[in-house]
Amino acid sequence: MDYTARYGLEFNPFLKNSKEVFVDTQEQKETLYRLDYLAATKGFGLLTGSAGRGKTTAIRNWAASLNPSLYKVVYSSLSTLTVSDFYRNLAMELGAQPAFRKPDNFRIIQEEICHLAMDKRKTPVIIIDEANYINNAVLNDLKILFNFEMDSRDRAVILLAGLPALNNTLRLGIHEPLRQRIVMNYNLEGMSKEEGRTYIHSKLRGAGCTQTVFEDSAIEAILNAADGTPRVINKLCNASLLIGNSSNLNIINSNAVMQAINDCELG
C-alpha cells in the first residue's frame, strides 16, 4: 500500500514538492515584518539563524511579495567567490555588462544602482545568502560600494543572510563601519513546541489529510528531537511516514518516530 494513501495524503507535505505547503508561523510573520521594514527604510539588513530554521524560505516568500515595478531583486548565494568574481556577478545580475577589472565593476554597479533608483524609480534589493562564508575583502568593500556621495539617503536594500557566526564576524573591529550601518538585525530562534504542533498539523491539512496520522506522543518525540528547526521536523515526519507504512501502522506511534530519529542519526 502506498504510504500517501494509507495516511490520507494527496502528496507528502514534508518533502520539497511542486505544491509546497507554506505554514505562516509567528516567527515567519515576525521575519517578514522585519524584512518589510528594511525594504521601506533601505540600507543594510542582517538575517541570521541556525541551519534549517527557515531563512531561505522566509527570504523567498518576502522577495516574491515585493512589487516588481518598485523593486529589482538580485539574489546571490555565491558568497564563496573571489572579490573580483563577486563584483562581476553583481554587475551582471543588476543587468549591466560586467568589466574585467574590479574598479570598473565597482563603478558599473554604482551607476546601475543610481540608474535603477533615480531613473526607473526602482529600489535594488540585493540578497546575499550564506553570507557567513563571504570573503572579508567583500565585506570591507560593501560599505564603500553602497555609499553614494552627496546623498544621505540609501538607494538600495542589501540583505546579508547566514548562520549566527555572521554576527561574530561583523563584531570584528575592521567591520565596525559596516555594522554601524545595519538598520535591521534579526535572528530566527526556531519554533516553540506549540508552533511545532501547529506546523505539523498545518502541513498535513495542506496535503488534504483529514485523519489522525501521528499519536500525540509521536509528535512530542519529533518536536523534542527537532529543537524547533523546521527542516528537521520535515525530515523526521517524512522518515516516520515511511517507517509507519512499512510497519503497517495506520497511526504512527512514538516507537516509529524513535526509529526515524535513529535512521536520521539524530538520536
Image: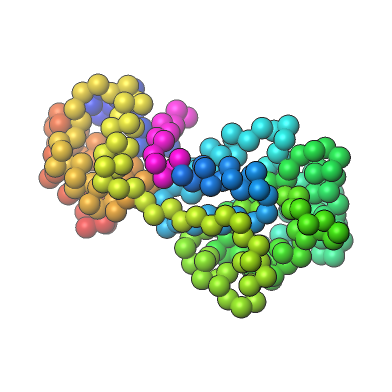
Image quadrant occupied by the N terminus: top left
Can see residue 232? no
Q: Main SS type for the magenta part? A: loop
Q: Nearer the viewer, residue 74 or 117?
A: 117
Q: Position of residue 128 (x, y in %)?
A: 62, 54
Q: Position of residue 6 (x, y in %)?
A: 22, 25
Q: Residue furthest bottom?
A: 173
Image quadrant occupied by the C terminus: bottom left
Q: Quadrant of residue 197?
A: top left
Q: Is residue 48 left or right of residue 146?
A: left
Can see residue 97? yes
Q: Is residue 81 left or right of residue 1?
A: right
**Residue drawn at x 68%, y 49% as measured from the top left:** 42
- Give, as a single range, the part of the protein colored magenta: 18-29
Q: Nearer the viewer, residue 236 or 156?
A: 156
**Residue drawn at x 25%, y 29% as measured from the top left:** 3
- Residue 34 position (above or below residue 160): above
